[in-house]
């Protein structure tokens, strides 16, 4: 079974940092785009950052300059380094990946989410 497992969420004060991880496992041939989304209470899920297989990155305007997305291809793991966190960054963060698998061909997979809380 192909799955994504996030870790690294928690509670920090404004201005603090967190590093989220997203580990992919299962019968994976390759991972194309890896993405981080977030969803705050009462709001729609939004795309925060993306990284292609060649390392090309894109960010939403609200996090650009504060968040850094990266990936370790041999480990099938993605990361989101979040610095200078603000209260409005508080949300459940979801990892998402477009991958090619042995059993199911091309798949879009979501992680279970990890909670980030930012408050003083």
Image (tube, rainbow, N blue to C red):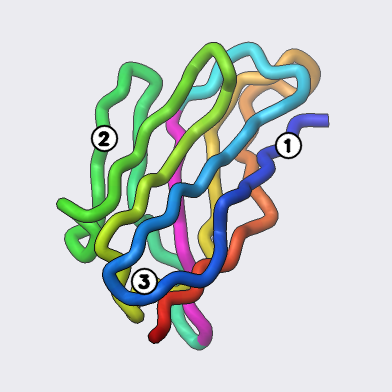
Q: Mark 2 points at which residue?
A: 57
Cα separation between marks 1 and 3:
25 Å
- Give the magenta-colored segment's residue range: 33-41
**Seen in the image, is 104 located left or right of residue 4?**
right
- Identify residue for label 1: 3
The answer to whether the residue labelled 2 contacts the one labelled 1, judged by CB atoms less than 8 Å apart, is no
Query: Between disc 1 and disc 3, whose residue precedes?
Result: 1
Q: Residues within 10 Å of mark 1 (few under 14, many from 20)?
A: some
Q: Is residue 12 left or right of residue 6?
A: left
Q: Find numbered disc 3 in the image and state the secondary structure of the residue it sits on.
A: helix
- Identify the residue at horizontal 26%, vertical 27% (top origin): 56
Percent from the top left, x then y, of residue 84?
Answer: 25, 63
Q: Badge 2: few (under 14), some or many (20 or more) residues near its Cα, within 10 Å?
A: some
Q: Pick whichever of labels 3 and 2 is earlier in the sequence.
A: 2
Q: Do the residues labelled 3 and 2 touch (CB within 8 Å)?
A: no
- Measuring 65% from the left and 49% from the top, which residue is drawn there? 111
* Quarter of the picture holding the N terminus: top right
Coordinates of residue 90 in the picture (x, y in percent): 43, 74
Residue 21 pos. (x, y %):
54, 41
Residue 53, by quadrant, is top left
Q: What residue would you read off at disc 3?
A: 89
Q: Is mark 1 on a helix, strand or loop?
A: strand
Question: Is 18 placed above or below 21 here?
Answer: below
Closer to us: 31 or 73? 73
**Lower position in the chain sequence, tag 2 or tag 1:** 1
* Magenta stretch, main secondary structure class: strand
């Amino acid at each position: 079974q192909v799955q994504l497992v996030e870790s690294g969420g928690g509670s920090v004060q404004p201005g603090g940092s967190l590093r989220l991880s997203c580990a992919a496992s299962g019968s994976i041939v390759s991972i194309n785009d890896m993405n981080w989304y977030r969803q705050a209470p009462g709001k729609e899920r939004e795309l925060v950052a993306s990284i292609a297989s060649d390392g090309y990155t894109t960010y939403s305007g609200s996090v650009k300059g504060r968040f850094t997305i990266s990936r370790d291809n041999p480990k099938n793991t993605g990361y989101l380094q979040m610095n200078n966190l603000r209260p409005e960054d508080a949300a459940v963060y979801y990892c998402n990946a477009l991958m090619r698998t042995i059993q199911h061909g091309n798949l879009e997979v979501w992680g279970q989410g990890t909670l980030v809380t930012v408050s003083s």
